[in-house]
Image (spheres, helix red, strand yellow):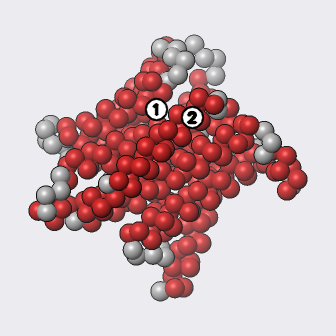
């Protein structure tokens, strides 16, 4: 099996999949810690459903690159969720629930009404749970992922102290002059970018797991914010890499295999955490 794995590394599609998978896993783990601590995990789940709906529209319009519509559309919805929920007197969780369910329903309805595909159920299932498109990436797709991932990591590092302050005590951050709403908006926008990047990797229904599981794993062993972030990044990258390799070797769905690896690590960390305590 080792020889077979080494032979697979010679193929560009495996190299591209690993590069994109590692970058997406790294970015999702960084924001995942903040989202879990701020109880913003539902935003990732809601925006992934929004991305599904927009992707359905892009498919009907026959866009050669659906990223041109999905990325700005999902980012716009993230901005609306953060800034618009108060104006229309809806709590954040209610607004996300309405938007996510509406996006799923309308997206599936549009695909049924206008899709010319002979395998509609397969297309929907691939979009929701991930597909083999991660193994058919072009150089342009990889380059776009690298650029956006570098941007996400750079923003997180640049505003690390502000994000830390807003994450743990938003009222204190406001009292010290930190523009908490602006940084909440930044977190939501970066989350939207990560979700769009992860659509091809794990599918729209499994993205929230990719964001949440590494953070929960790290919190079982560490208490420091920085230690949790570092541990979550390592766990996420290892699970993504092992999930992709197992998927290539065994022919299993990429997204589901990555999430299964995260579940195994979560159980392992939970046991170690109990023993440690």
Q: Judge by depth and name the residue closer to the eye, 228 or 205.
A: 228
Q: Considering only order in the chain, which callout, 2 or 1, is on the residue closer to the N terminus?
A: 1
147 vs 37, left or right, is right
Q: Say what secondary structure mark 2 lies in.
A: helix
Q: Position of residue 127 (x, y in %)?
A: 55, 33
Q: Which residue is mark 2?
A: 143
Q: Residue at x 45, y 71 (%)?
A: 227
Residue most toward the left?
175
Q: Nearer the viewer, mark 1 or mark 2?
A: 2
Near mark 2 (Cα within 10 A), the count class, few <14, some 14-19 or many ≥20, is few
Placement of 136 over or under 32, stated as above or below? above
Q: Judge by depth and name the residue closer to the eye, 50 or 181.
A: 181
23 vs 176, left or right, is right
Q: Which mark is residue 151?
A: none
Q: Position of residue 195 (x, y in %)?
A: 45, 41
Q: Residue at x 53, y 47 (%)?
A: 24
Near mark 1 (Cα within 10 A), the count class, few <14, some 14-19 or many ≥20, is many
Q: Give me the C-alpha separation between circle 1 and circle 2.
A: 23 Å
Q: How many marks?
A: 2
Q: Which residue is mark 1?
A: 52
- Which of the 4 image quadrants contains residue 134? top right
Q: Position of residue 146 (x, y in %)?
A: 54, 40
Placement of 152 over or under 79, stated as above or below? below
Q: Judge by depth and name the residue closer to the eye, 16 or 54.
A: 16
Q: Are marks 1 and 2 in contact (CB under 8 Å)?
A: no
Q: Residue at x 72, y 50 (%)?
A: 245
Q: Say what secondary structure mark 1 lies in.
A: helix
């Amino acid at each position: 099996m080792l020889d077979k794995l080494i032979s697979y590394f010679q193929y560009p599609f495996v190299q591209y999949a690993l590069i994109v998978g590692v970058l997406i896993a790294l970015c999702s783990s960084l924001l995942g810690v903040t989202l879990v601590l701020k109880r913003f995990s539902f935003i990732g789940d809601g925006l992934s459903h929004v991305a599904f709906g927009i992707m359905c529209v892009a498919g009907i319009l026959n866009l050669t690159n659906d990223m041109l519509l999905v990325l700005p559309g999902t980012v716009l919805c993230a901005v609306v969720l953060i800034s618009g929920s108060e104006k229309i007197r809806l709590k954040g969780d209610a607004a996300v629930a309405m938007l996510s369910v509406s996006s799923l329903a309308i997206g599936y309805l549009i695909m049924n009404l206008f899709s010319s595909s002979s395998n509609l159920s397969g297309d929907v299932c691939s979009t929701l749970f991930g597909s083999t498109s991660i193994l058919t990436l072009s150089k342009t797709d990889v380059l776009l992922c690298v650029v956006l991932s570098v941007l996400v990591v750079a923003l997180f590092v640049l505003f690390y102290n502000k994000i830390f302050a807003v994450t743990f005590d938003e009222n204190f951050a406001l009292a010290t002059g930190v523009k908490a709403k602006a940084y909440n908006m930044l977190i939501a926008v970066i989350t939207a970018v990560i979700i769009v990047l992860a659509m091809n990797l794990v599918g729209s229904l499994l993205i929230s797991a990719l964001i949440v599981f590494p953070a929960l794993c790290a919190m079982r062993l560490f208490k420091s914010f920085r230690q949790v972030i570092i541990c979550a990044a390592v766990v996420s990258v290892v699970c993504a890499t092992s999930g992709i390799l197992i998927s290539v070797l065994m022919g299993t769905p990429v997204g589901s295999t990555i999430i299964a690896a995260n579940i195994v690590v979560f159980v392992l960390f939970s046991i170690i955490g109990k023993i440690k305590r």
